[in-house]
Structure formats: structure tokens, C-alpha cells
């Protein structure tokens, strides 16, 4: 069974509308891109969509109440809400260093959650 999927490319400011013709997990045809990056983006988005994740975590005893965090790699789109649910449960104690790994292998994704800001202890 074939299925058409329209994807708006976000690699550059042009924002090409790329039409991907899927047959199960196989791409039969792809059109509408204006560059090679559009092809790569559309293939990844059609077959294995992923998102970089940013959020914040509560801090205990720090000079700020929250620390900003990001995923070390893009998270599979179907795991985003599961990852966010796990992040919501966490509280960390100050001090926290920029780049410090806060959580490892979150939601069994082999992706770490990393601090994007340093927080000093009060």
C-alpha cells in the first residue's frame, strides 16, 4: 500500500514542500526538494522522525530554581512524551556544571540529558 506524505523541509529558509511516496517502510518517490539536504531531511522525517529535546529540571539548593537541559541526541518522536514524563519526576541538587550529564539512557533510548547551564550552590 502506497501513501503520500508531504513534509516541509526545515534545513534552510526556503522551506520546500517535499512529497514523499511511501510503500510501507520503503520510499518509492521523492519530489519537491531544491537541494540534497532536503532529500536527506525528508527521508529521515518519513522513516525515522526525531526531535532535539529541551526542557528544565527543578534544582534543590541552587542560586536558580531550574536548570535548563537538552538531549544529547535527537529523541525518536514516538518517545518524546515518555522522555518528558521521566524528566518531570527529577529534582537535582546544586551545584550543577554546564555539560553535566543529569540522566543517562533516558527511556531506554541510549540518549543522555545534559545541563545547558551551571547552577551554583547557595
Image (spheres, rainbow, N blue to C red):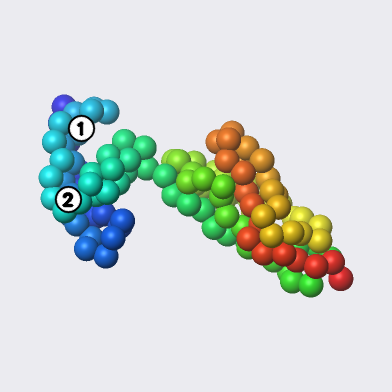
Residue at label 2? Answer: 33
- Whether tag 2 and tag 1 are in contact, CB under 8 A, the answer is no
Q: Earlier in the sequence, mark 2 or mark 1?
A: 1
Q: How far apart are marks 2 and 1 (CA)?
A: 15 Å
User: Horizontal placement of 118 versus 95: left or right?
Assistant: left
In the rendered structure, the answer to whether residue 98 lies left or right of residue 25 reads right
Residue named by callout 1: 27
Q: In which quarter of the image is the N terminus?
A: top left
Residue 80 in sight:
yes
Residue at 67% across, 55% down: 99
Q: In which quarter of the image is the C terminus?
A: bottom right
Q: Position of residue 6 (x, y in %)?
A: 19, 48
Q: Point out residue 23 in the picture as x, y percentages from the top left corner.
A: 19, 29
Q: Counting other residues with Cα less than 10 Å from the Cα at mark 1, is it few (<14), some (14-19), or many (20 or more)?
A: some
Secondary element at tag 1? strand
Q: Is mark 2 on a helix, strand or loop?
A: loop
Occupied quadrant, residue 40: top left
The residue at 31%/56% (across/down) is: 11
The tag on residue 13 is none
Amino acid at each position: 500500500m502506497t501513501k503520500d506524505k508531504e513534509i516541509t523541509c526545515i534545513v534552510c529558509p526556503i522551506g520546500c514542500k517535499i512529497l514523499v511516496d511511501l510503500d510501507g517502510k520503503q520510499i518509492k518517490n521523492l519530489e519537491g526538494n531544491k537541494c540534497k539536504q532536503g532529500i536527506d531531511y525528508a527521508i529521515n522525517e518519513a522513516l525515522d522522525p526525531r526531535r532535539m529535546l529541551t526542557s528544565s529540571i527543578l534544582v534543590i539548593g541552587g542560586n536558580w530554581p531550574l536548570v535548563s537541559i537538552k538531549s544529547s541526541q535527537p529523541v525518536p518522536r514516538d518517545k518524546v512524551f515518555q522522555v518528558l514524563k521521566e524528566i518531570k519526576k527529577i529534582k537535582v541538587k546544586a551545584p550543577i556544571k554546564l555539560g553535566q550529564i543529569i540522566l543517562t539512557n533516558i527511556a531506554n533510548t541510549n540518549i543522555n540529558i545534559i545541563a545547558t547551564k551551571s547552577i551554583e550552590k547557595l
